[in-house]
Amino acid sequence: MVTFELICEIEPPTKPDLTHVRHQIGTLGKIAHSFLIPDNHIGRATVSSVAVAHEVEAMGGRGIACLNSRDRNLLGFQRDLLTAAAYGVDQFLFVYGDKPTSGNRTSDLTVRSMIEEARRFSPGLRLGAAAALRPLPAWKRTADFLFAQVSFSLEAQLRWREAHPVDVPVYAGVMVLASERHARTLAAAIPDIALPDDLVARVAADRMAGVEAACEQVLALRDSGAFAGVHLIPVSRYRDVESRLATAL
């Protein structure tokens, strides 16, 4: 029987303290097959994703370190690969990166060149890329796995998956809508994300509505058989998510 993988995203620390990270790992470790650690999340400086992935491994989990092309040149990227090798971190998700809150982007690397450089560094690494819900560039098919863009529409996810078959595992993006304010923040940061009006209204009236909707989407994606698993972003609601999914998965 093929395992449906639940990859939970961790909120990375913006201060030199891993207490909250450890609590997320300990709580979600009951349901998660592995953890994704963002890199300078939404354009803010955070503790290195490689260091947090190492912490996940030390706690008995499997970590996927996200690295963006926005913040590093080739030498910095090679440093990250060396650090990861020293820590035993061998799974990565390479992304472009959100707009930074301060400073500028570097133009030295692209996700494509990061994959090529990482292959040269070590053929044994497991490398992933992000996929928007639109036609898939040919070079992304060289990745070992794909993280599909977050969507609040199961139908849109299934249509995209059927239209773009690939021979590598694809993980559907699911996010908990935590509040009406969270919805406004998302809409401003990601203009092309479609937020259902009825979901926003339900979340405004009931703080658990976003958790319930995300968990129902996870289970529906599992039952569809279309994806290898889900990349779940529980944001601050990770305790509620664990409680809801622990008995359902």
Image: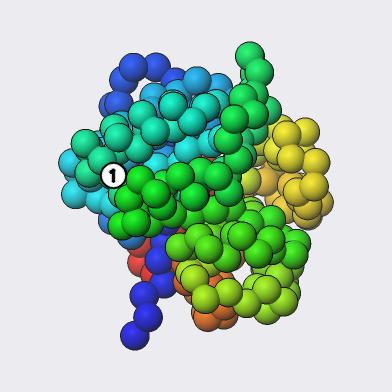
| Vertical order, 177 against 97 (above or below) | below
| Vertical order, 191 against 28 (above or below) | above
Q: Do we see residue 239 in this rendering?
A: no
Q: Do we see residue 119 in this rendering?
A: yes
Whole-percent x and y of residue 241? Answer: 45, 52
Q: Nearer the viewer, residue 69 or 2?
A: 69
Instruction: Identify the residue at image location x=59%, y=53%.
Output: 130
Badge 1 marks a residue whose secondary structure is loop
Instruction: Say what amino acid the circle numbered 1 marks.
Output: Val
Residue, far top = 103
| Vertical order, 12 against 101 (above or below) | below
Q: How many marks?
A: 1
Q: Residue 186, located in which quarter of the rendered image?
A: top right
Q: From the image, which quarter does the N terminus lie in?
A: bottom left
Instruction: Identify the residue at image location x=30%, y=26%.
Output: 18
Report the side of 24 relative to 59 (left or right).
right
Report the side of 178 relative to 33 (left or right).
right
Residue, far front = 120
Whole-percent x and y of residue 234? Answer: 50, 46
| Mark 1 lies on residue | 89
Q: Nearer the viewer, residue 206 or 7?
A: 7
Q: Nearer the viewer, residue 130 or 112?
A: 112
Q: From the image, which quarter does the C terminus lie in?
A: bottom left
Instruction: Identify the residue at image location x=69%, y=61%.
Output: 137
Whole-percent x and y of residue 172? Answer: 57, 62
Whole-percent x and y of residue 12? Answer: 43, 31
Instruction: Identify the residue at image location x=71%, y=70%.
Output: 160
> What is the basis of the colouring in this image?
rainbow
10 Å neighbourhood of mark 1: few (<14), some, or many (≥20)? many
Report the side of 85 relative to 199 (left or right).
left
| Vertical order, 26 against 244 (above or below) | above
